[in-house]
Image (spheres, grey):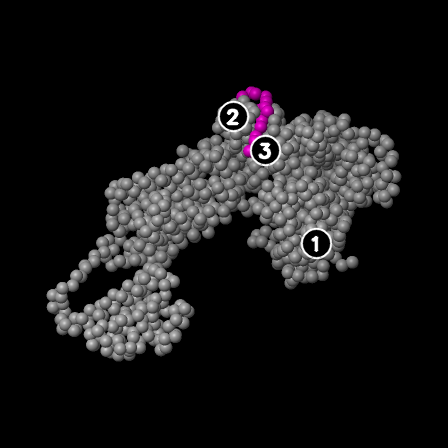
Amino acid sequence: MFKLFILIKKEILQFFRNVPLLVIVLYACTLDVYMASEFTQDLRNYPMAVYDLDRTPRSEALVRKIRKPFFHIQTYVQEERNIEDLILRGDVGVVLVIPKDFQKRLNSGTGATVQVILDGTSSNTAELAGSYLYNMVSSFSSDILFERWQVSKTTAKLVPIVSSRIRYEFNENLTDEWTMCLQEFFTMMTLIAILLPATAMVNEKQFGTVEQLMVTPLRPYEIMLAKVIPMVGIFLVASFISVYCVMVPVVGIPLRGSFLDFLILTIMFCITSSGLGLLVSTVSQNLSETVLLTILLLFPIMFLSGAWVPPEAMPPWMRALVTLSPLKYYLDMGIAVFLKGNTLLFMWKDCLALGGLGAAIFWLGAVRFRKMFG
Amino acid sequence: MEPALVLENISKQYKSVQAALGVSLELRPGEIFGLIGPDGAGKSTLIHIAAGLLDPDQGKARLFGVDVSKDPEGIKPLLGILPQGLGLSLAQELSIEENINYFAEINQVPQKERDEMKEKLLTVTQLAPFRDRAAKNLSGGMKQKLGLCCTLIHSPKMVFLDEPTTGVDPISRRDIWYLINKIIKERELTIFLTTSYMDEAERCHRMALMHQGQVLALGDLEQLIAQTEGKLLEIHAQDLQGTLKGLKDAPGVRVMYPMGDKLNALCTGNGTGASDLAAFAAGRNITVERIEEGRPTLEDVFLSKVLKESGGVNQKALEELFGGGEGARSSSEDKVIVVQNLYKYFGKFAAVHDVTFHVKRGEIFGFLGPNGAGKTTTIKMLCGLFPPSSGSGTIVGLDLMREQMKIKKSIGYMSQKFSLYRDLTVGENIELYGGIYGVSPVELKRRKSLILQIADLEGKDRAITDSLPMGIKQRLALGCAIIHKPEVIFLDEPTSGVDPIARRLFWDIIFFLSRQLQVTILVTTHYMDEAEQCDRLSLMHLGKLIALGSPQGLKSEIHKEIGAMLEILVDAPFEALEVVSRAYPFCNIFGRTLHLYTPDVKRTQDTIGSLLGEKGIQVKEVRTRLMPFEDVFVYFCEKAEKEGKKE
């Protein structure tokens, strides 16, 4: 036990002497997480051009309907041939074309059409822009309808249309920085949890110090534990800093569940990732190989976590692989603890799955490690 | 004639270290210039400044008249550089041939020229049969040979070699020197090299001795030797360490140190002679076989210049560390290491093949062999780093196969890779290893202060280990390896790349451990003078044990087989070798002399002058000498190779 303590102390000393690594970890759990909260997937200031052939009060009313902050009208097109140019150059992402006779047709009651041309290369935003515009035009036309039928705001309820009342649970205003921030945090922590033990181990391998340890009466599992335990500790401190210095006070994410649950979850996840890190260190020969391999490993873990694409939208074989991404469990349960206030007990199935996966990966790492160094 | 390289008053300082202080040198075209000095003397710094890789704080470097710091790009086609470290300049994944092609391409060598040069280099270095082998799979010696080929492929006019032979076995070292001489003879080429092997430095045309950033001595070998004050006495005795202890303070003796199988003493000018010293020895009841006047070698020059300043071994601290009653020997067994028919296979390749030997308590047992012979593998098996494929053995009476954990408690290990934690302080390293071996905190505090004394690091336990000079690091590593008072110490090339003085101090510790404290030591080395100080030696080649015995025993074995050695001093040793080797199969170059083995000394002595004279090579001196240990090494390896081919 005393030996283990000595080794752990050494590991922590080495960590704090490695200034670049220290900076990276601090950056990942503070600034990086904060920056992620400023990135939003929502539509903001989407550049737009308007080609108004009608130039009547009606058409202008429609253009006025297009609101900030979603769209920003960059320019008014004067000639048709300019439209293609604008989109090709990427100056605008959407062009609204209001045809001639727009007002005349509306007033005559035949109904009018507007054309929306979207840049489909950034498909997600184009889709969002399309549906936002659709909503704006719909609301514009229902206004006209009400005006025609001379329905006042008070009597509007009497009009027989179906309206849906949408309520967003847990994140009432759909503050999308919360999810962005949490996702980034979980992803960065994955990177760190794999990288820290892997680099520490590979450094020993490269400098020959692991040989020196192996000729002492230490057992391989002691050497391994001495790598993993301090890493878990550093990891916990990093997540504590991230939660209580950035996410809760600065970004304003509510921690509705218990921090203890979150810590336990984090420990479970960290052990799993350390196993991956040890696995990486047995395969790679030097630091650069370790870093490359870790990044390579990180991508599938991220893709399969459901952070980018919901697993339900994946083909069946990929959906099967999702269960192998430790990040998926950490992300699902972590967000649930934060926003839904779930307890681990409530999510015992996922807990069990993460525990099982962790045990398997750690065991694999340990076996490889013993073979390499034992 | 315009000098090839001029260094004018070069100074360079790193933080607190003065790496160069007013160094001025001139290299003539076509000469081999050697830079020697202890670690951290500023040798590499000087090479980097001369090659335009580093700007000096002061002074100027001119290469063939071009100011290096003003036009570093312009001089590049003129120079080749081989950096320090085995195979560091090579692309590890590429084959030998691809590496050479790559270096030719970045230097824009025309293909026809490249192919001619490549074949020549591959032939001379005997790398041709392995041309498709990846660099990472080459032995240390082969890597250096390949590195040299890559440095020479674009026919540079000036070549910088930074410790080209450190960590390389004697056979590969001979090949490298053969290549250097062959190339320099064929084309106008100037070579600027650093080395920690003194016999190699003797082969240079001129040399400079550097210490703490300054040039202490400069000139050719004769000039340097002439600068050595006083005369050299060689003392032959059975018990070298005892004799050294007894005679060190004899009147008139300036310094005394072991040198191979004898002691060398540098004495003041006209004071002590051989007879005076013999009388002094007799007065102290020290048995000395004979004392004779010798010719100082470069190593003597080096030691006499620098040895004065270094302290000795802290014997008291060592004694105290191992004393204290606690370290009761686990068994009275006399044979501390016993190895029987040991095999280790990596796949189908037998890295260790049927090795059998034993080591007695308190013995210093040397393990020699070319790079890749299986020495390190054997040591690693004995330390329990991995299990043998078959065979049996005991260490301090414990079974090698079944009682590894117990064995680990009674052995110490220090590997060729410097195995302390560089980012920890001196004290933290000591505490770490003490803690691992379960030394109690109070006892650890005591041992820590002793180890600091042994490593000459008192009051520096807060220094970061990486900042220490090489020689001190090695002693600290040894200190950490003996913190648990092991009965056996395994040392795997502990002194590789360490300068002669630090090496001597290191060996003084080893001697003390073995002689006074009865610690058993198994050591591998490429330094032949160290090999000669072992009690017994084993020589490994291609995984097999090819010779086993005391240094003296091995020498007399050779004497029986090929005769006595003649040392021939000639003006052109490499040309002479080509002539002589036709008549005598056993001859080689040592320092600047030719060594030749003949069963009929008298006849050879008479005829050798005319044999060389016919080719216009003048013989300056012929005399019988005791064979140096390097010849023993090479002889047995070549014999094993011939027998291997017959099979």
Amino acid of disc 2: Met
Identify the secondary structure beneath mark 3. Answer: strand
Main secondary-structure element of the magenta-colored stretch: strand
Crowdedness near tag 3: few (<14), some (14–19) or many (≥20) residues, C-alpha within 10 Å: few
Closer mark to the observer between disc 2 and disc 3? 3
Q: In terms of depth relative to the viewer, which is nearer, B558 or A301?
A: A301
Residue B177 placement: quadrant: top right
x 24%, y 59%: residue: A173
Could you tell whether A62 is left or right of B180 in the image? left
Please tell me if label 2 and label 3 are on a single chain. Answer: yes
Q: Please name whichever residue, B394 or A10, is drawn nearer the observer in this view of the structure.
A: B394
Amino acid carrying label 3: it is: Phe
Task: Calculate the distance from the C-alpha at mark 1 to the C-alpha at mark 3.
Answer: 38 Å
Q: Residue at x 73, y 34 (%)?
A: B631
Q: Element type at marker 1?
A: helix
Question: How far across and down, in percent of the image, does residue B616 sit?
Answer: 86, 45
Instruction: Name the residue rendered at 41%, 42% in the picture.
Output: A276
Label 2: how many Cα within 10 Å (few below 14, some 14–19, many 20+): some
Going from the N terminus, do you reach mark 1 or mark 3 first? 1
- Is B79 contained in the magenta span? no
Q: Position of residue A168 (x, y in %)?
A: 23, 56
The quadrant holding residue A165 is bottom left
Q: Residue B224 in the image: x percent, y percent?
A: 75, 46
Instruction: Read off the residue under disc 3.
Output: B349
Residue at the image point whose x is 36% and y is 40% from the top: A358
Q: Quadrant of the N terminus of chain A?
A: top left
Query: What number is the disc on residue B401?
Result: 2
Q: Nearer the viewer, residue B345 or A234?
A: B345
Write down the region rendered in magenta.
B331-347
Check the image and name the residue furthest to the front.
A110
Please give the chain letter of the residue carrying mark 1. Answer: B
Residue at the spot of label 1: B112
